[in-house]
Amino acid sequence: MTGTLFGLGIGPGDPELITLKALRLLRQADVVVYPAPLEGATRARDTVAAHLTTDQEEIPVRLSMRADEATKQRAYAAAAERIRDALDAGRDVAVLCEGDPFLYGSFTYIFIRLADGYPVEVVPGISSITAAPAVALAPPVTREDVFTVLPATLPVDALEAGLKQADSAAILKLGRHLTKMTKLLERLGLADHAIYVENATTPAQKVAQLSSVDEAAPYFSMILVRCTPERWR
Amino acid sequence: MTGTLFGLGIGPGDPELITLKALRLLRQADVVVYPAPLEGATRARDTVAAHLTTDQEEIPVRLSMRADEATKQRAYAAAAERIRDALDAGRDVAVLCEGDPFLYGSFTYIFIRLADGYPVEVVPGISSITAAPAVALAPPVTREDVFTVLPATLPVDALEAGLKQADSAAILKLGRHLTKMTKLLERLGLADHAIYVENATTPAQKVAQLSSVDEAAPYFSMILVRCTPERWR
């Protein structure tokens, strides 16, 4: 009997935004895997620290935020091999996923390496794309609205095309692309309808009109923008 | 002192997919409001029934699934007035929201009527747009992918334009639009990359290749489609 691989969405940061199901499966797991920086606090582990038990094996997947794609894939491949060994030994493995496992989550890179050989269960988590509108009290879409999620790392023309097709958009992975995005939204006449949200649901949370933000944006930040502003509520 | 209005995301159907935070606030609420059909089971209430207490006032917002927009808005306006009375009396009111309160949720219609006058807190919930990929084991987006949510009720040309801008899409509100969507996806060469998900995370859950689905789709169903199929994992 091999173990089961669980991808557990643990939500956007507030430890209370984990589901009962993720919590139950986390507590039952023999091995707990989570992303970690090369040094310093491990945000995913910290979010669920109150629920971990001392008899669980922990496997941090250490990666610099600035690692290139090849380095990242080597780290996920190495983590997948350690997880494979645990599953082969009949142990259940929970991979902690900030937000949701499959929505821009690195769990996908572990999943594609192991899904063919082992039972897998994925527990959805609260994504920042719903957490940010909730803390900003800004409902993005109703009825027949089109909602689009755009990584700010895309070229400007792709971002512009995406914004023009949407009624409302969430722009992720801002970081050093904040100025590029602000300029684009100004050119499209949408900057006044854009809300900046940083570290939603955590003590470091910040919500502001985009026009009032001028410093660099951290990784966990996004812009919510109503692209058809006459219908922004 | 007026009460606080809480919009509580209760998730896609599995009672375990509620967050600790929504559960705590639900238990503390003096009044619990939920959508309900004109007759028969109330899905939202049933999902959290184990957690309700006998001293909570319940306000079902009764609406036919086939009600026209004016009828719906009259029902939300009437519900908002009952909620206003409770808030004015200093009672905390929890509105149960299937999925997430602000992502195509009817909570928005209550929110816009009361947000200016009362304290409001919105607790995000697991949306079907992450629940469906999780149960289908189909990761929709990684890295720089564009993810778009399209209501199937839109005209075909708007749906086609949206699909062409996205790497991956979730098509909601299928119902009687299933045949229209299937034909469009076939014409765009995407039908073989489309997954049909019905009642995700509930006992009535169904996951199938779109090409194998021929009967009518219920309200709680969607299509997940990889629009750039060479990158579907």
Image: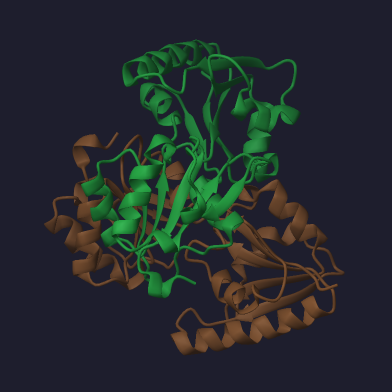
Chain colours: A brown, B green
Q: Residue B104 appears in which quarter of the rendering?
A: top left
Say left or right for B51 vs B6.
Answer: right
Q: Position of residue A60 (x, y in %)?
A: 67, 77
Residue at figure coordinates x 31%, y 46% from the top left: A146
A2 vs A59, nearest the viewer: A2
A210 vs B228, nearest the viewer: B228
Q: Residue A220 appears in which quarter of the rendering?
A: bottom left
Q: Position of residue B186 (x, y in %)?
A: 34, 57
Picture layout, residue B220 above or below residue A130: above
Q: Position of residue B79 (x, y in %)?
A: 46, 15
Residue at figure coordinates x 62%, y 38% from the top left: B22
Say left or right for B40 vs B197.
Answer: right
Q: Is residue A170 visible?
A: no
B84 vs B149, nearest the viewer: B149
Q: Position of residue A39 (x, y in %)?
A: 60, 81
Q: Is residue B156 visible?
A: yes
All told, the count of numbered labels is 0
Residue at figure coordinates x 62%, y 71% from the top left: A42
